[in-house]
Image: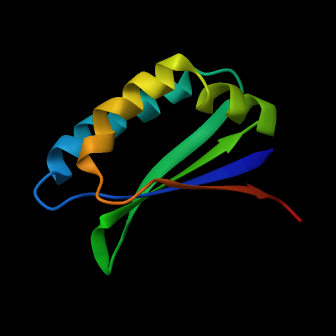
Amino acid sequence: MIRVLIERHIAETLESAYEEHSRGILQQAITAPGFISGETLFNAADPNHRLTLSNWRSAADWDRWYRSDYRKDLMNEILPMMDQDEKITILEQC
């Protein structure tokens, strides 16, 4: 199993629109082969700094979802709401 940490920073005033779209992305990821679970958090010191932590069966499963046209289409909807590039970290257990 791997974990994927996705960090995004949302532009001021676009928080509610981002929330709506990001929930849709997570809902679609749930149906992706290899998806185990996921949660979305925000940084208590900076509520526009959003984090999604998801668990995947394998790096190949994550990569398939990450590179899918479906995810790309969903991401195109939220990219204009972000004021920094998305940062993705793949984590493995020791």
Quadrant position of the N terminus in the picture: top right
**Residue 92: quarter of image:** bottom right
Q: Is residue 37 left or right of residue 62?
A: left
The residue depicted at 69 percent of the width and 51 percent of the height is: 3
Q: Is residue 56 left or right of residue 49?
A: right
**Residue 20: quarter of image:** top left
Q: Is residue 37 left or right of residue 9?
A: right
Return the residue found at the far bottom.
45
Q: Position of residue 48 (x, y in %)?
A: 27, 65
The residue depicted at 76 percent of the width and 48 percent of the height is: 2
Instruction: Evaluate whether residue 20 shows in this view.
Output: yes
The residue depicted at 62 percent of the width and 27 percent of the height is: 67
Residue 9, placed above or below residue 33: below
Residue 61, placed above or below residue 14: above
Residue 63, placed above or below residue 53: above
Instruction: Evaluate whether residue 58 shows in this view.
Output: no
